[in-house]
Image: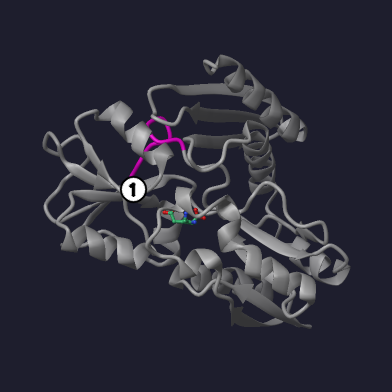
Amino acid sequence: MKIRVGSRGSKLAIAQAQIFLESVKEKHKEFEYEIKIIKTTGDKIQDVSLDKIGDKGVFVKEIEESLIEGTIDLAVHSMKDMPSAIPEELMFSAIPKREDPRDALILNYGRKGLDELPMGAVIATGSKRREYQLLRYRPDIKIVPIRGNIDTRIRKMYEQNLDGLVIAAAGLNRLKIKSDIKQNIILLDEELMLPAPAQGALGLEIRKNDKELDDVLRLVEDYESAVQIRAEREFLKEIDGGCHLPIGALCKVEGENILLVGLLGNEDGKILVKRKIEGKAEDAEMLGIKLARIIKGEMPK
Ligand SMILES: NCc1[nH]cc(CCC(=O)O)c1CC(=O)O
């Protein structure tokens, strides 16, 4: 079978589609694919901050239209960029093994670590979740906004002589970006920096009626990743926040049990509520909803 796969044109989008598709080929010898690049609204508008151009849908709308029209059969997305609701005609297939969910800090030349940064050091991020959690740990740090794909962000760090940049470890790993003489990459512990719901996971979007493709993709399902994503995405959906609020979630699986940590803050970051819940893996969705309700109940009106 030959599958037409839609992907955004960024290096990261193409790399993660290829890495994933090669892993399917290993399990299913007859599997063949071609990648079609689709330019989304989010890719076209590069100079506007994301909270101003609308919801998460800006990176997926054109790709979903191609799926529905039938010009592609599969879209490989970063699950964390996916809105809670997808079109009726479509569904997510299997959840493959998740990359490292943590955030990483890329430090410019000579900077040793977060604790060693001088007072008033300048760190770039466009995410409220990253900004406010970093400020909790180091209130003296100055946060500046940044946009663009991973290479562009790193280039801007050098050009503007910033001290560092927060970015998803998954993206760095997939693009094989490592520490070197010019930059030092450190992973941020989830205690300090709770990741975005589903960070590091892929969302495999297909047509609901494409049973044949769904069966093939099920070969690469990863049980633990699937449970984590169910809990974290259900938490996100119930929080119903939008990208102007800091929202984080991370689920850990221990056999049949899970531990889910969730975070919600207000717009200016003065309030950050972080709580956890434990239970059975089979109740992942319900626990996500329950935790979201607990946290929302603690937010001042
Ligand atoms: N928001 C953009 C985006 N979408 C997915 C990733 C990284 C890969 C992933 O989390 O799956 C990134 C870059 C980042 O957040 O630093």
Neighbor class of circle 1 (other Cα within 10 Å; few <14, some 14-19, many 20+) is some
Q: Quadrant of residue 29?
A: bottom right
Q: Is residue 116 visible?
A: yes
Q: Is residue 188 magenta?
A: yes
Q: In the image, what residue occupies the spot 52% across and 15% down?
A: 300
**The C terminus lies in quadrant:** top right
In the rendering, at what x and y percent does residue 88 appear? 82, 56
**The N terminus lies in quadrant:** bottom right
Q: Nearer the viewer, residue 246 or 221?
A: 246
- On the picture, is 19 further left or further right than 235? left
Q: In the image, what residue occupies the spot 67% across and 31% down?
A: 288
> Which secondary structure dominates the residues rendered in magenta?
loop
Q: Which residues are magenta?
A: 187-194
Query: Could you say whether the residue bearing mark 1 is in a helix, strand or loop?
Result: loop
Q: In the image, what residue occupies the spot 83% across and 65% down?
A: 215
In the rendering, at what x and y percent does residue 42 appear? 51, 63
Residue type at mark 1?
Thr
Q: Which residue is mark 1?
A: 125
Q: Nearer the viewer, residue 287 or 297?
A: 297
- On the picture, is 116 further left or further right than 143? left
